[in-house]
Amino acid sequence: MIRSVLFAFALSALLCMPVTAQSTETDPLPHYPDAPLETVVVEDDTLAYIDTGGDGPPLVLVHGLGSNLSLWRDHIEPLSAEHRVLALDLPGFGVSSKHDVSGRMTDFAASVRGFVDTLELAPVTYVGVSMGGQIGLTLAMEAPETVERLVLVSPAGIETFTDEQAAGLRQMMTPQAIASADSSAIQQNTAANFASWSDDYAWLIKQRHALAERDDFEAYARANSASVAGMVDEPVYDHLGTVQMPTLVLYGTGDKLIPNPYLNPQWDTQAIAQRAAEALPNATVHLVEDAGHLLMIEQPDAFQKHLQEFLARSE
């Protein structure tokens, strides 16, 4: 949610140990889910996460570029009725640590794998939105034993870019450009994630302003810039034929970010969804009406319906 073009595109197991102590650095941001925030160390990164516990099959929820685990706040409790639900902040985002974040999709995938291994969750159902979708695809290719099923919401990685386009994205999304966004830009860029704006989504803007007041905000800006480069530097589309596990792909018909309206005006969302259906061997693909990029927020009932049907069918 940094600029309107951001979401249009963004491994061996790691040694890790759990951390039980809370600190001011792991206090939740405003509008986080009303649940205890836990931390775990994966290599040198302290990852913040929510874990509903229980004996149900594990669902791991992963956010996209510029965001955090609060994107799933309306779905954690409903999903916990039958599943152990875990939502985490990736390195560089939310209230996880933000030092030396490479932005590479393989490194994010390794962090998620370390998280899963530390908590002894594998195999999991991986649910990722936008960049989180591309991370999930990377994880599924690098460590298929970790992922039993994939759920990809508005995933990056299906849309592709030329070398020239990728270079332009890298040059535009500098840490300085991200950090200097004013209130008007934040409002505009947040609204671009939805087919139709509602004041119900204003909490995202308030949370973004709160993030700018944190001591680690400059590191957050650097992580976002690096992640833009990471998405275009490690494309996955040509290798999706190796992703064999059952996969659900959801795109909103009103997505204003994928495909990128400036770089790929020849495509629409239906064309991107068709690319996903053709490239992924065991994919079920749906277009969600009246939904934009963050369709699980804009159309929560439709998201739940498609997800629950997929889970019931593939279990």
Image (cartoon, rainbow, N blue to C red):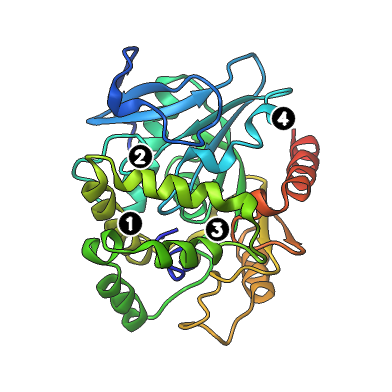
Furthest-left residue in view? 100
Nearer the observer, disc 2 or disc 4? 4
**Residue, disc 2:** 110
Name which residue type carries label 4. Pro
Q: Nearer the viewer, residue 38 or 248?
A: 38
Choose mark 3 or mark 4, whichever is in front: 4
Kind of residue indicated by mark 1: Ser
Vertical comparison of 304 with 175: above or below:
above
User: Disc 3 marks which residue?
Assistant: 155
For mark 4, what is the residue? 78
User: Which circle's residue, 1 or 3, is located before the other in the chain?
Assistant: 3
246 versus 148 height, above or below: below
Which secondary structure lies at badge 1?
helix
SS state under label 3: loop
Residue 227 place in picture, x, y as percent: 33, 56
Where residue 160 appears, as percent x and y from the top left, is 47, 73
**Few, some or many C-alpha atoms within 10 Å of disc 1 (few <14, some 14-19, many ≥20)?**
many
